[in-house]
């Protein structure tokens, strides 16, 4: 019997790979937007993570008729009063690497204590006609000089408080135990909403 299908509402290939790993314990067929035939825009209309994650999940679930998992995530730097936060992927033009080095320039004169940061993720699961469900996860760390090629986004410069190494250097299995995305997904698992049954196979 084929596994239930679940769409992940992101065009970030690194995030698709990570979510497929994190969902590996579930009997699910995880689909990218291309797999699901979704060609529309993914708007992020809100000022916060919850609004943006919900908007993406509901948009794709409505268009495809399939349960959809979306996340909105960002890095928050204590000394910058939580900035860039939900704007982490778009606060300056260019590539992920450009934004990483741009953020490091913002904190280059700061002490290590002032470089403390957290990754935040809000995940939303839309599975009409049920009401969408959200969950939040966080992981603490410090911004340091980048090293490593694992992960994506700000991972090479995020020294994890849990692991004692940069996410950019951490094996996938280690990062997947403590990441903000893993913790948000764990809360959805605890709520039982990832048991999609047989309706969407």
Image (cartoon, rainbow, N blue to C red):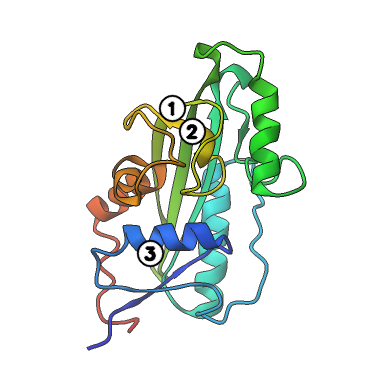
**Badge nearest the viewer, 3 or 2:** 2
Q: Residue at x 40, y 68 (%)?
A: 127
* Residue assigned mark 3: 20
Residue 47 appears anywhere in the view: yes
Q: Residue at x 32, y 62 (%)?
A: 23
Q: For marks 1 and 2, give the CA distance.
A: 6 Å
Which residue occupies the foreground of this view, 85 or 114? 114
Which residue occupies the foreground of this view, 135 or 37? 37
The tally of labels here is 3
Q: For marks 3 and 2, give the CA distance.
A: 22 Å
Q: Position of residue 198 (x, y in %)?
A: 26, 81
Looking at the image, residue 164 lies above or below residue 187: above
Instruction: Report whether 109 appears left or right of 66.
Output: right
Q: Position of residue 34 (x, y in %)?
A: 56, 77
Secondary structure at badge 2 equals strand
Mark 3 vs 1, N-terminal side: 3
Which residue occupies the foreground of this view, 188 or 62? 188
Mark 3 vs 2, N-terminal side: 3
* Residue assigned mark 1: 141
Q: Residue furthest right?
A: 93
Q: For marks 3 and 1, give the CA distance.
A: 24 Å
Q: Pointers 1 and 2 in contact (CB under 8 A)? A: yes
* Residue assigned mark 2: 158
Looking at the image, residue 6 lies above or below residue 87: below
Instruction: Report whether 116 appears left or right of 39.
Output: left
């Amino acid at each position: 019997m084929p596994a239930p299908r679940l769409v992940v509402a992101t065009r970030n290939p690194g995030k698709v790979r990570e979510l497929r790993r994190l969902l590996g314990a579930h009997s699910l067929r995880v689909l990218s937007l291309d797999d699901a035939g979704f060609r529309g825009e993914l708007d992020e209309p809100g000022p916060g993570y919850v609004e943006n994650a919900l908007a993406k999940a509901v948009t794709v679930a409505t268009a495809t008729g399939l349960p959809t998992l979306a996340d909105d995530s960002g890095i928050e730097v204590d000394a910058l009063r939580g900035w860039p936060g939900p704007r982490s992927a778009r606060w300056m033009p260019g590539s992920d690497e450009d934004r990483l080095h741009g953020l490091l320039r913002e904190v280059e004169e700061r002490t290590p204590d002032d470089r403390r940061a957290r990754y935040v993720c809000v995940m939303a699961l839309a599975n009409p006609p049920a009401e969408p469900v959200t969950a939040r996860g966080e992981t603490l760390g410090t911004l340091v000089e980048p090293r490593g090629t694992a992960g994506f986004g700000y991972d090479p410069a995020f020294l994890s408080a849990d692991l004692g190494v940069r996410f950019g250097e951490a094996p996938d299995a280690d990062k997947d135990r403590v990441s903000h995305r893993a913790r948000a997904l764990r809360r959805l698992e605890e709520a039982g909403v990832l048991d999609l049954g047989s309706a969407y196979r």
